[in-house]
């Protein structure tokens, strides 16, 4: 993220009107600070896999330049929202749109078609400046690049920047209108007070949120607001601070040290924008304050050097281009890290693309007088193209038969939502593969799988049933919903779902942890199961670990504790051994023309020879079942079986294939419960 709408123009362009009314000299050192901050971001991504604090520094700089200028114009009754919004779009879109177009083309060449929908969704989110919310809702943890990382992931910060620019501007404009009859000085004080209150509220919100849900909070726009406003507030008063040159020199170098140390002192991916973000934010503020007047030995002198100025001039493009180049390199080579030479090449290419982007795209569209009509039309065409192509692909895949479009699953012979392929076939056509990727149980369409801490309960099966089986846990419990619903209808019991995405059913505080929200949900659902007096619980019995590239299975102590808690309440548990977690998504292989065997996996690579439940200290009311002989027959786990694709990703069964296991599941469940 960078400060994208400076309040004064760099050399070679005409300064905005505000410069004529102020004696503040142009801060070339802040251009250098931009360059340093973006260089930290790039180095952190390419070689260290760490969050550097550079994004936080850019938010502070954006506050100094943009919000401060906005406040002054609102206080003077000179601010107009329409031209301001156009200026924001004119500055951001010429950077984002070329990256989106190049990445979409690259994705078609590099990625299998099964990943095109995800790329398309994120392309649209990037152009519409909503990428941060897309990542937040997907629960994407931000950090180092790896194989499978989104090439658009880094553009979340530009989305936050655009939202903050417009959101704060609207707030100031509305507040300014309410106090329009007051004097200029009073209006200014009111607006500054409002920013202080908003900054404190945002910092409090971020501090609480980072402890409860760090992934969501990292991308939350309001959680980032305090960083922008900290820059704005310091920028409004920095010229009035009576600091001696020696003091400013010390503060500047101390601030630079804080900014440089951020990458090694804290893990920003899980602590920002909470209190730990005060380290890069505070360091940036100190550098800004220290450079209000030039010095010879201060940090501002370093930031005014040609290399710093050159990097600062290309900062926006450097930020935009380095990440897709990095992710593309890792995807093509299959590496988990970047060697020194390759990293240097990636950075050099990023500089080259940034310079091309600056000269031929950014500069023409950010000129104060606006782009020529033809250039404006060209940009509009590119924007429409960057939206139309991804939207067209999404519409195509959405038109395919999805699992949630048919709730009537009559029998195991017709349970699958996918059209079965010939049992002798070894390959699938593209539409069949894309349909398989969507073949999830209808609990998702019914909104019966929670995402927060609330317990979501849904009931299926006969209304007059006298027994109830609770399906409890995460998506790996939920993948058995389709055959269980059929069995419930056939055998006359209710199926009640207590499910949460990206979670499991296990006692918190032992050897399990995914998130604070998952822990809170587990506490709530355990109480709810006892209160609802279900007759039995169906859940997963094992977890899968990847240690040194080798898959292993285990029965967590947290599972055992939860089963014992239910046993103490007289509720029996039926625990199913988890299905294999694969190293890669077999649908990617099938989409590239692979066949059932070549896209499959040897059983010994994903499952232990003996289920770990055999040695687990199970309680008297716990029964375990294992259906993996049907998923991986003859010591091999094929990509296509029983006429259906087996997996919809690298660890979930397709609903259609799961439905073909109705009979063995019904037999195992009958033996475990004795209900029929």
Image (tube, rainbow, N blue to C red):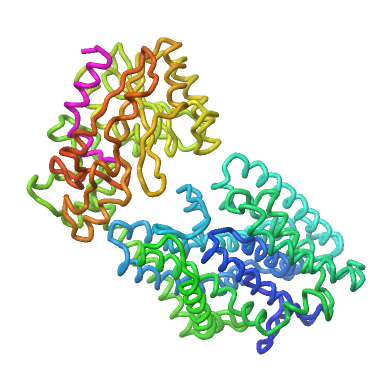
Indicate whether 365 appears above or below 497: below
Residue 468, position in %: x, y?
33, 16
Indicate whether 193 appears above or below 103: above
Horizontal placement of 415 versus 182: left or right? left
Quarter residue 159 falls in: bottom right
Front residue of this view, candidates 93 and 436: 436
Q: Quadrant of the N terminus?
A: bottom right
Residue 661 part of the magenta-drawn span: yes
Is residue 228 visible in the rendered image? The answer is no
Horizontal placement of 99 versus 162: left or right? left
- Kindly identify the residue that appears in the image at 30 percent across and 61 percent down: 393
- Kindly identify the residue that appears in the image at 57 percent across and 68 percent down: 43
Q: Magenta span: helix, strand or loop, mainly?
A: helix
Residue 394, position in %: x, y?
32, 58
Is residue 200 visible in the rendered image? The answer is yes
Q: Quadrant of the C terminus?
A: top left
Q: Residue furthest bottom?
A: 12
Q: Which residues are magenta?
A: 652-676
Horizontal placement of 669 versus 235: left or right? left
Indicate whether 610 appears above or below 69: above
Front residue of this view, candidates 456 and 299: 299
Quarter residue 319 falls in: bottom right
Residue 400, position in %: x, y?
23, 51
Front residue of this view, candidates 650 and 446: 650
Residue 50 part of the magenta-drawn span: no
Residue 336, position in %: x, y?
43, 60
């Amino acid at each position: 993220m960078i400060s994208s709408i400076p309040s004064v123009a760099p050399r070679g362009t005409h300064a905005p009107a505000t410069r004529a009314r102020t004696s503040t000299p142009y801060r070339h050192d802040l251009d250098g600070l931009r360059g340093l901050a973006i260089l930290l971001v790039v180095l952190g991504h390419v070689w260290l896999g760490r969050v550097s604090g550079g994004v936080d520094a850019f938010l502070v700089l954006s506050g100094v330049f943009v919000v401060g200028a906005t406040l002054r114009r609102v206080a003077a009754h000179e601010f107009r929202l329409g031209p301001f919004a156009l200026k924001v779009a004119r500055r951001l879109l010429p950077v984002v749109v070329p990256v989106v177009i190049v990445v979409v083309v690259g994705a078609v060449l590099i990625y299998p078609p099964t990943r095109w929908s995800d790329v398309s969704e994120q392309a649209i989110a990037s152009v519409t400046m909503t990428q941060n919310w897309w990542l937040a809702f997907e629960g994407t943890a931000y950090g180092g690049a790896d194989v499978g990382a989104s090439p658009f992931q880094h553009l979340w910060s530009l989305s936050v920047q655009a939202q903050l620019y417009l959101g704060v501007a609207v707030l100031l404009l509305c507040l300014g209108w309410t106090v329009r009859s007051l004097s200029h000085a009073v209006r200014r004080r009111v607006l500054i007070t409002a920013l202080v209150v908003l900054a404190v509220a945002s910092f409090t919100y971020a501090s609480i949120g980072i402890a409860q849900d760090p992934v969501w909070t990292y991308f939350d726009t309001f959680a980032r607001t305090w960083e922008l406003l900290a820059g704005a507030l310091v920028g409004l008063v920095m010229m009035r601070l009576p600091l001696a040159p020696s003091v400013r020199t010390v503060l500047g170098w101390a601030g630079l040290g804080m900014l440089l140390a951020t990458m090694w002192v804290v893990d920003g991916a899980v602590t920002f924008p909470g209190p730990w973000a005060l380290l890069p934010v505070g360091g940036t503020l100190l550098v800004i304050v220290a450079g209000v007047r030039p010095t010879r030995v201060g940090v501002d002198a370093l930031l005014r050097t040609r290399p710093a100025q050159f990097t600062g001039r290309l900062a926006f493009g450097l930020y935009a281009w380095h990440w897709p180049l990095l992710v593309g390199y890792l995807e093509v080579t299959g590496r988990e890290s970047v060697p020194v030479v390759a990293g240097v090449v990636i950075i050099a290419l990023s500089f080259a693309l940034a310079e091309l982007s600056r000269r031929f795209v950014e500069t023409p569209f950010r000129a104060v007088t606006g782009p020529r009509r033809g250039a404006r039309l060209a940009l509009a065409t590119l924007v429409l193209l960057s939206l139309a192509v991804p939207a067209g692909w999404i519409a195509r895949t959405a038109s395919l038969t999805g699992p949630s479009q048919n709730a009537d699953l009559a029998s195991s012979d017709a349970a699958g939502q996918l059209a079965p392929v010939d049992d002798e076939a070894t390959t699938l056509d593209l539409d069949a593969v894309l349909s398989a990727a969507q073949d999830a149980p209808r609990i998702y369409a019914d909104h019966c799988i929670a995402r927060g801490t609330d317990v979501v309960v849904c009931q299926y099966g006969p209304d007059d049933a006298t027994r109830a089986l609770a399906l409890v846990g995460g998506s790996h419990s939920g993948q058995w919903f389709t055959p269980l619903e059929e069995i419930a209808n056939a055998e006359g019991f209710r199926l009640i779902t207590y499910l949460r995405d990206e979670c499991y059913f296990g006692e918190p505080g032992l050897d399990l942890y995914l998130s604070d929200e998952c822990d809170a949900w587990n506490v709530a659902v355990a109480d709810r199961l006892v209160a609802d007096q279900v007759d039995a619980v169906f859940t997963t019995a094992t977890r899968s670990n990847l240690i040194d590239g080798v898959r292993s299975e285990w029965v967590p102590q947290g599972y055992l504790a939860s089963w014992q808690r239910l046993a103490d309440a007289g509720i029996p548990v039926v625990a199913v051994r988890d299905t294999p977690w694969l190293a890669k998504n077999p649908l990617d292989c099938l989409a590239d023309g692979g066949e059932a065997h070549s896209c499959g996996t040897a059983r010994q690579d994903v499952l232990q020879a003996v289920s770990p439940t055999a040695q687990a200290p199970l309680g008297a009311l716990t029964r375990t079942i294992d259906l993996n002989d049907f998923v991986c027959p003859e010591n091999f786990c094929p990509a296509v079986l029983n006429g259906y694709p087996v997996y919809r990703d690298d660890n979930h069964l397709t609903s259609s294939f799961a439905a073909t296991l109705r009979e063995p599941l019904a037999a195992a469940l009958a033996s475990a419960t004795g209900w029929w």
